[in-house]
Image (spheres, rainbow, N blue to C red):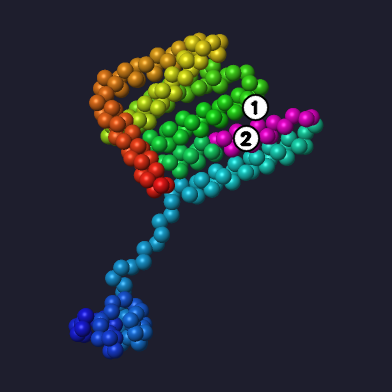
Amino acid sequence: GGRRCELEMRYCETCGISISGTIEYCPLCQSKLSGEAQEDAYPVLPLRRKPHGLIVRFIALITVIAVVVCTVINLSLPGNQRWSVSVTAGLASAWLSVGMTIRRRRNPMKAALWQLGLVSVLVLLWDWYTGCSGWSIHFVLPVFFSCMQFAVSITAWVLRLSPSDYMLYLLLCILAGFIPPILLLCGVLRITYPSSICGGISVIFLAALLLFKGPALRHELVRRRNGYYGKWIDDQEQSE
């Protein structure tokens, strides 16, 4: 940089340095540069737009239009039934579930676990809202817990995830699958076959996990326990 470069570059007579690009003044001393301007060595690249961004906004607009139209029609018709509230709540539930998936898309196993908790809560709330008939715990949750075990297993196989990346999440889905049969044994449920099938599927998945991935699962549980315990010790030391 102390001598003038033989290439056609901008040159600062004060600092004695050659500068590439199209700038007019020296970035060091702000003196006017001599020589011909050259194209930037690192051209400015246009920002990449997310391909799903426009689609999401378009669907959001359609959702708003649907809510407004349903509300206007509901208020215009005679009667005291407010079915538009159910439509709005249903669309909000769908958006909440889809938004959670999009937000956690970089970690599909964590997204599946969040869906497990979120959908369970939404289903129970909808059952309560529609009169507490029990369809959520008798039918929907047993089927949903069973499907989640298959979904996590297939996703891990398709993405070729390492055991440490999916085993704990699969174990939590399996444990959730034991909730319906436990409620059945406690006499809470009246209809037996959905919960029985869910319990049988959970037993099969748990047996397969222990037989084929038992040592890896035990190692993962010990690793996470030690990590949480070490973090708790550090927090206690900092608080003291």
Q: In which quarter of the image is residue 27?
A: bottom left
Query: On the image, numbered disc 1 is attached to which residue?
Result: 129
150 or 15, which lies in front?
15
Q: Which residue is drawn at 42% across and 47% down?
A: 239
Label 1 crowd (10 A; few <14 / some 14-19 / many >=20): few
Residue 192: percent from the left, percent from the top? 50, 10
**Outermost residue, right direction?**
78
Can residue 82 be found in the magenta stretch? yes
Amino acid at dot 1? Tyr
Magenta stretch: give its range: 79-94
Q: Quadrant of the N terminus?
A: bottom left
Q: Is mark 2 on a helix, strand or loop?
A: helix
Q: In which quarter of the image is residue 157?
A: top left
Asked whether, in this view, residue 53 is left or right of residue 5, the answer is: right
Q: Is mark 1 on a helix, strand or loop?
A: helix
Q: Eyeballing the image, is 13 above or below 213?
A: below
Q: Is residue 194 at least partly visible in the picture? A: no
